[in-house]
Image (tube, grey):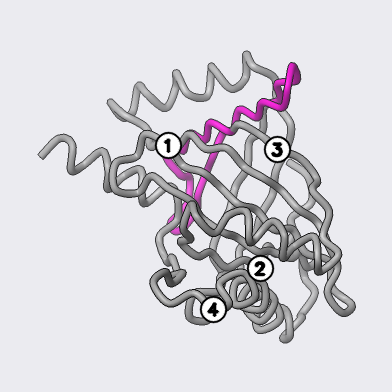
């Protein structure tokens, strides 16, 4: 896997009616649309406690890529998370083998399908990636989510990163929801992996 980084991120649940307003707000703030992907994320049994081990199929037009990533949450500040992340590109065969081996251990694996609209921009002295995700086929967890993240090199202490990420996310959302009386965005503490696990467990019950 590539060198570890600290992924500082925050996630909110948003409304379909406000997605275009968020797009406009991002463009007004100087963000650029980086890419639109269709993603299929499948989580494997982790090797360590608190670890998230994921294989991803990423489709963009006619291009299809595969990734293996490991994430471990080091710190939480309210809804903001500091995760240690390592990711590497793999091929389709490796992805299929990893999933097949995992299915020998578990009958089902948490899986999430989503379309991601990715934006990149700079606020102050910090670079950010903003993602608007449309999650499908996940019951009550289906819908739109808004994520803001910045990356900090592994081993570097950056005390301002977590408050900066939250401040930037709220700045975007407050501008997009300005004047809105009926709709309110909500912080989302659940990871996509936990959403998928809860959805599957409730389907079985």
Which quarter of the rendering shows the N terminus? top right
Q: Where are the magenta residues, as a range?
A: 39-65
The residue that label 2 is drawn on is: 8
For the residues marked 3 and 1, what is the alpha-carbon distance in whole angstroms? 16 Å
Could you give the CA–CA distance between mark 1 and mark 4, rounded to whole angstroms?
A: 29 Å
Q: Mark 1 points at which residue?
A: 136
Q: Which of marks 1 and 2 is nearer the N terminus?
A: 2
Identify the element where label 2 is drawn: strand
> What residue does disc 4 label?
179
Q: How far apart are marks 4 and 3 (CA)?
A: 29 Å
Q: What element carries label 4?
A: loop
Q: How far apart are marks 1 and 2 (CA)?
A: 25 Å
Q: For the residue carrying disc 1, how many other residues have a C-alpha within 10 Å: few (<14), some (14-19), or many (20+)?
A: some
At horizontal 76% and vertical 81% (from top left) the residue drawn is: 158
The earlier-in-sequence mark between 2 and 4 is 2
Per the picture, the main secondary structure of the magenta-coloured stretch is: strand
């Amino acid at each position: 896997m590539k060198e570890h980084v600290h992924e500082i991120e925050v996630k909110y649940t948003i409304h379909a009616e406000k997605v275009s307003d968020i797009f406009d707000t991002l463009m007004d703030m100087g963000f650029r649309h980086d890419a639109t992907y269709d993603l299929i994320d499948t989580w494997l049994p982790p090797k360590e406690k608190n670890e998230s081990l994921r294989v991803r199929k990423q489709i963009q037009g006619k291009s299809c890529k595969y990734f293996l990533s490991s994430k471990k949450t080091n710190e939480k500040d309210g809804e903001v998370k500091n995760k240690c992340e390592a990711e590497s590109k793999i091929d389709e065969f490796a992805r299929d083998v990893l999933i097949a081996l995992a299915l020998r251990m578990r009958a089902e694996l948490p899986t999430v399908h989503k379309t991601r609209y990715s934006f990149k921009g700079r606020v102050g002295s910090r670079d950010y990636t903003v993602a608007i995700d449309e999650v499908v086929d996940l019951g009550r967890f289906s819908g739109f989510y808004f994520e803001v993240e910045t990356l900090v090199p592994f081993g570097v202490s950056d005390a301002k990163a977590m408050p900066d990420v939250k401040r930037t996310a709220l700045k975007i959302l407050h501008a997009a929801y300005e004047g809105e009386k009926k709709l309110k965005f909500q912080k989302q503490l659940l990871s996509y992996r936990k959403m998928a696990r809860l959805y599957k467990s409730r389907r079985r019950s």
